[in-house]
Structures are given as structure tokens and as C-alpha cells.
Image (spheres, rainbow, N blue to C red):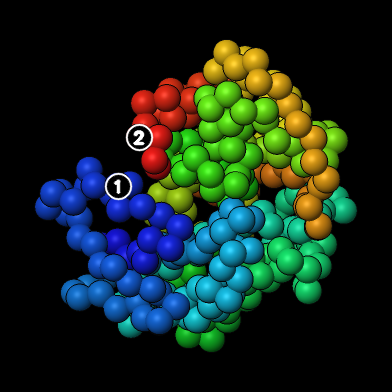
Amino acid sequence: MCLDDFSTGRPENIAHLREHPAFAFIHADVSVAADVPGPVDAVAHLASPASPPDYLRLPLETLAVGSRGTENALELARRNNARFLLASTSEVYGDPLTHPQDEEYWGNVNPVGPRSVYDEAKRYAEAVSQAYRRTLGVDVGIVRIFNTYGPRMRRHDGRVVSSFIAQALGGQPLTIYGDGKQTRSFCYVDDLVRGLVAMLDSSENGPVNLGNPEEWTVSDLAELVLGITGSDAGIEYHPLPTDDPVRRRPVITRACEHLGWYPEVPVVDGVRRTVDWFRNADPAL
């Protein structure tokens, strides 16, 4: 059973699943209600805008889905005595003062900055999930997802991998904010899905970092995309947005030890696969 309001997604992403006998879809906003018929074994709460342009365009909706949406999903799990998986984010670490980041780090978040609508929504989601676990006995598992990329991303969703690929394939200069020396850790979507399933199948409470500890500067990623696409469009530099984190890399010891999980797809291979998908995708997507 899949619930989505397509505020940042597309029906095309699930078109291949529509006829599967084990799949059903409900068009719904979980910040309003998360009701599904029949028994529920597990609830995976991944609802939220996730790219900066989306959550800055939908600030109140982002806060609502992180608060009321999480509570509604937790209530669904509680009523069914189901496992609950919260998809949190590395953004709870803010612009980190320690590097790399393990799950014991409490973060460096600006609670009133423009990015706070996402950061604080996820921090609240973690807090209310743990309160449901401690107070009501809900079987909660929290993962903190680091930058994820792969097929079916929107060309203009504002995340760096999809933006670079769309610009390169369109013959436009790649846009780098800041000096390009800031770092990210990019996890291919197939690896992330394996981690989510492993968390659902475990009894681990978390939080558990899910990400690829292979750290890249944004400039190096841009050069990789230019090389794979064969683009000679070059690079343009723009000012760094407010509160944009300078360095980001996960410690994944807990995921390795508790979930038996480690990312398997190197960034070079994952970006090549993503470029291939974008080349063949409908340009309108």
C-alpha cells in the first residue's frame, strides 16, 4: 500500500507497479490522515519534500508532514502493532562542527533559518517517534539518510546530482554554489533501499546513518558529470545559500554492525547509471 499526494513526486514513478497484485495506491496527504484498510505489518514514513527548492517552496507543508504527518503514521503503526520506520535525514546534523558525523552527534542547526523548516521538522519527527516508543511501546526504527540519487529524480528538483546531469545534457553550464570545495557523500538509490528494508526487518531502534562514506567535493562531482556526459558546457559559480553545510560524511559503523549493510555502488558507477536514465527519460519529467 502506497500513500502519496504527489506534491514533489510523479505518478509515472509508480506506473510500473500499478498492475502488480501486491500493490495498491491511495492518493492522500499523510499530514491530514494516514488511514489504510486491512491489517498493517509495517509503516515506512518517507513523506516529505527533501530538496531545498521544494521545502523552501512548501515550508508549512514540510513542517506539517514532519509533525502531524509523523504522528498520523505513528498512530497507524500503533493501531496495528506494526513496525514503524522513520526516514530522517543527515540534515538533523545541520552544518556539522564534527567530521565525519556519527549518530551520537547532536548537530549544529539554525532553528530559525530558511532551512529550519526541513531540519527541525525531521528533528521533531525523531523526537515524537522516540516518545511513541518509550510511552506507547511502538516498534520504532529511525534512519538518517545522507544524499541519495539515482533514476526517476526530477531534472529540476534542485539536488546537486540531478541538477548537474540535467544541465550537462542540456548544454548549460553546471551551477556550483560557493567555491565547490564543500563536500557531500552520495548514496545510490538501490543501496539506500537495501538499507531501508534491512532496518524494517530488524528490531534496531536507531538512529542509524544510511549513506555512502565516499566523500566528494562538489567541484569533483561536477567534473565527473561533465566527463561522463561528454559536455563542454563548463561551470558557473554562485554565492553559497544560507546555512548550507560545508562538509557532510556519515559514519556507518552502526549500519554495518546492526544491519549488515554497506553501500555497494561506487559514485562513478551510480552517476553513470543515472546519466543513462536521464538520457532516455522523457525531457518533460
> Do tag 2 and tag 1 residues touch (Cβ < 8 Å)?
yes
Q: Which residue is mark 2?
A: 282
Viewer-nearest of discs 2 and 1: 2
Q: Quadrant of residue 106?
A: bottom right
- 215 to 103, vertically: above or below: above
The image position of residue 162, as x and y in percent, is: 55, 37
The image position of residue 267, as x and y in percent, is: 59, 27
- Quarter of the image where the C terminus is located: top left
**Helix, strand or loop under label 1:** helix
Between marks 2 and 1, how big is the CA–CA gap?
11 Å
Q: Amino acid at mark 1?
A: Glu
Front position in the image: 26 or 123: 26
- 253 to 221, vertically: above or below: below
Looking at the image, residue 244 sits to the left or right of residue 201; the answer is: right
The image position of residue 47, as x and y in percent, is: 46, 64
Residue at the farthest bottom position: 135
Count numbered badges in the picture: 2
Q: Which residue is mark 1?
A: 12
- Mark 1 is surrounded, within 10 Å at the Cα level, by few (under 14), some (14 to 19) or many (20 or more) other residues, namely few
Can residue 138 be seen?
Answer: no
Looking at the image, residue 32 sits to the left or right of residue 68; the answer is: left
In percent of the image, x 76 and y 31: which residue is there? 236
- 276 to 99, vertically: above or below: above
- Mark 2 is surrounded, within 10 Å at the Cα level, by few (under 14), some (14 to 19) or many (20 or more) other residues, namely few
In percent of the image, x 38 and y 61: which residue is there? 6
Front position in the image: 231 or 148: 231
In percent of the image, x 53 and y 27: which residue is there? 170
Q: Amino acid at mark 2?
A: Asp
- Quarter of the image where the N terminus is located: bottom left
